[in-house]
Image (cartoon, rainbow, N blue to C red):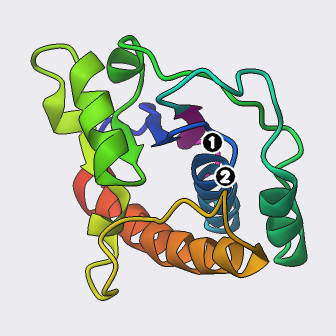
């Protein structure tokens, strides 16, 4: 990787109000702590447009705040075909979102699409569950999973894109 090139990471879930903004916030805090905030850029999007312009779910914001992560600046948007040109990594939270993203992925860009939990192979879960219809405990569980996958994603980026 050229030292000047920025790595761009897009996290995607269905509505972009629970899992993907949590992942963006956690990963953004991690790269800031590691001094990589100027080299790795983050965003999040949803595969549906139900919540465009809305902030993350209150429970996601509260869970993140309890753990020192601020999601207040994030707003939902819909994933677009152009995202596969703009981002080096398009990260799906589960297989349904992965499939939906495959549908809009232009030819030759499939190598940019990943399933988030593939970066945490030591965990038994292979998808980040949607906590929207559950209680607060589901948001805590998602946060824990996102932290682990974020560590693996950062290591992958370091191993494959940074000298």
In this figure, which residue is indicated by the disc labeled 2?
18
| Residue 122 lies in the magenta stretch | no
- Relative to residue 161, is residue 51 drawn left or right? right
Q: Quadrant of residue 109?
A: top left
Position in image of residue 16 (x %, y %)? 62, 38
Q: Quadrant of residue 130?
A: bottom right
Residue positioned 41% across, 39% down in the render: 3
Front of the two marks 2 and 1: 2
Residue positioned 49% across, 66% down in the render: 150
Check if mark 2's residue and mark 1's residue have beta carbons within 8 Å.
no
Badge 2 crowding class, 10 Å Cα cut-off, few under 14, some 14 to 19, many 20 or more, is many
> Would you place residue 57 above or below residue 118 in this image?
above
> Would you place residue 93 above or below residue 85 in this image?
below
**What is the quadrant of the N terminus in the image?**
top left
| Disc nearer the start of the sequence (2/1) | 2
How many numbered marks have been drawn onto this rendered protein structure?
A: 2
Nearer to the camera, 78 or 154: 78
Residue positioned 82% across, 77% down in the render: 67
Q: Does residue 113 appear in this view?
A: yes
- Callout 1: helix, strand or loop? loop
Position in image of residue 17 (x %, y %)? 69, 43
In this figure, which residue is indicated by the disc labeled 1?
38
**What is the quadrant of the C terminus in the image?**
bottom left
- Relative to residue 122, is residue 4 drawn left or right? right
Position in image of residue 121 (x %, y %)? 26, 80
């Amino acid at each position: 990787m050229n030292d000047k090139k920025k790595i761009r990471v897009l996290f995607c879930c269905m509505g972009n109000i629970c899992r993907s903004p949590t992942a963006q916030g956690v990963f953004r805090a991690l790269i800031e702590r590691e001094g990589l905030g100027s080299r790795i850029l983050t965003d999040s999007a949803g595969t549906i447009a139900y919540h465009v312009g809305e902030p993350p779910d209150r429970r996601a914001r509260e869970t993140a705040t309890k753990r020192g992560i601020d999601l207040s600046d994030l707003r939902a948007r819909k994933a677009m075909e152009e995202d596969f040109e703009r981002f080096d990594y398009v990260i799906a939270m589960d297989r349904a979102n992965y499939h939906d993203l495959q549908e809009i992925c232009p030819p030759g860009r499939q190598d940019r699409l990943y399933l988030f939990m593939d970066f945490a192979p030591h965990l038994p879960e292979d998808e980040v569950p949607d906590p929207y219809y559950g209680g607060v405990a589901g948001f805590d569980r998602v946060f824990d999973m996102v932290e682990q996958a974020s560590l693996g994603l950062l290591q992958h980026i370091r191993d494959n894109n940074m000298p």
